[in-house]
Amino acid sequence: MSWPGPVFQIGAMTPDAFAGPDGDFTPDEVAAIQRFAGAAAVQRAVLTARREFERTHGELTLRLETLERTASMVDALLELATATEPPLPTDVAAAVAGGLDAVAALLDPGGRLIAAHPAVPLVAASPELARRAAADPGGVVHEAGTSHLYAVSITTAARAEGTILVVRRAPLDDDELAALRRAAHVLAALRVRQNALLQAYEELRTDLLTELLSSRRPLARPVRVLAEARRFPLDRQCVVVAVDGDAAIGRVVADAAGLLGGVGGRYDGVPVAVLPGDDPQAVVETLAARTRRVTGEAPRMCASDPAGAGEGALPEAFEAARHGLSLLRAAGSAHRCATTRDLALYRPLFDPQRSGDVRELLDAALRPLLDYEREHRIDLVGTVHVFLATGGNASQAARRLFIHPNTMTKRLERVARLLGDGWQEGVDGLRLRLALHLRSLGAEALGPDAAYDRAG
């Protein structure tokens, strides 16, 4: 049986439009059909509305889950930013990764990796993304490929402090992008706080170091408050270590001193550390080891005897350590680490107030040889030094100097004519040996008015 076309529009037709194969439908039949069509239309509308509701409900549920997840991320970052102790970079990366359901990394201003969560290798394009993000503060740089990469700069009013890098299979939606920008703002606030704390810490450390090394009387109450804030032990014996180096070394020494429970920095142009301890040798070796880990090589250091930090005794300890450091400089690179106890024998000779005595000794003992050297270009001072070091063995000295024995004999004869036949004996011989020893330590280079340049 076939039905005419109008039956497919049954819900919209009048009774006159209905006809069956054997004639017109009766009014009751038309009414029944219309009721059936109306019910079907209502059911269809209900099903359509339900499907639309389920779709919308699913989208809303997914969005609510995203908003809840990203809001938890921002809350976690705010807690880290306001914590008493600075957060670990790995904790920050973990919070971002959890909030965005992705791999998250923190990069320094140069694009180098600081921390990542989970700890997986990142793509090589991350430094370029970091540069692009730094050029667009507040914006999110996106790079699509097998994975989607996102980068946003952590920028304060002063400068770019780093980059958040996010890697995910699926792209971030608008809510997640907004949360990523908010995370960058929170971390920028964290960097502002950290920078302010570092500046305050540096000022506190510098003030405390200055007070400790300048006060020659028991420390006043304000200084003790500074020490307590810095957790510096005023009730313990301390060792002052003077270090040979520039401002960069001073910063390394300051950081190492802080890790060792002391305080450090630059004072009167000298990198210096004040460290708790009563064994100068152990203290200076520990500081040297810490410095070597950072710089690859420990600079010259000289440690003072222990002194009471709260009693005003550290200025004298600093002067002794600095004086010992000047001796180490004169001694050359063979002596990298020492204490003032080690150098006690040489301290009077290298006392700046007695430097004239040292120059006078050098002048009296070596002047004839140095004058001859300048005129004839023959190293008599070096010849005498090696000759005496070999116990007066002319043949062995000639071999060490790579000269012919006859040349050695002629040089020694020349020395005897310049200094006298008894130049190896008595007081003159002792003075000559001491002058040569001081010269080997570099005593002639103690100041701009030094008597001689190093010969040979």
Image (cartoon, rainbow, N blue to C red):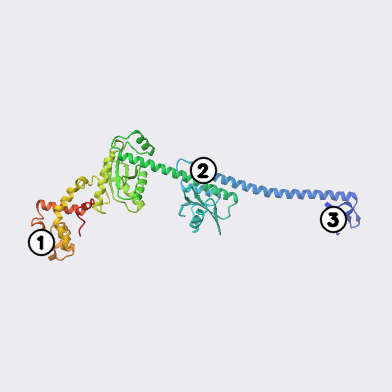
Q: Find numbered disc 2 in the image and state the secondary structure of the residue it sits on.
A: helix
Q: Earlier in the sequence, mark 2 or mark 1?
A: 2
Q: Nearer the viewer, mark 3 or mark 1?
A: 1
Q: Position of residue 10 (x, y in %)?
A: 84, 53
* Residue at which label 3 appears: 7
Quadrant of the rendering where the C terminus is positioned: bottom left
Amino acid beneath label 3: Val
Q: Residue type at mark 2?
A: Leu
Q: In the displayed structure, does residue 264 sit left or right of residue 456? A: right
Task: Check disc 1 and give the amino acid type.
Answer: Glu
Asked if residue 309 is positioned above or below residue 25 in the image, the reply reads above
Q: Percent x, y for residue 135?
A: 51, 54
**Mark 1: which secondary structure?**
helix
Residue placed under numbered mark 1 in the picture: 413
Residue shown at the point (16%, 50%) measured from the top left: 360
Q: Which quarter of the rendered picture does the N terminus lie within?
A: bottom right
Residue shown at 25%/49% (left/top)? 326
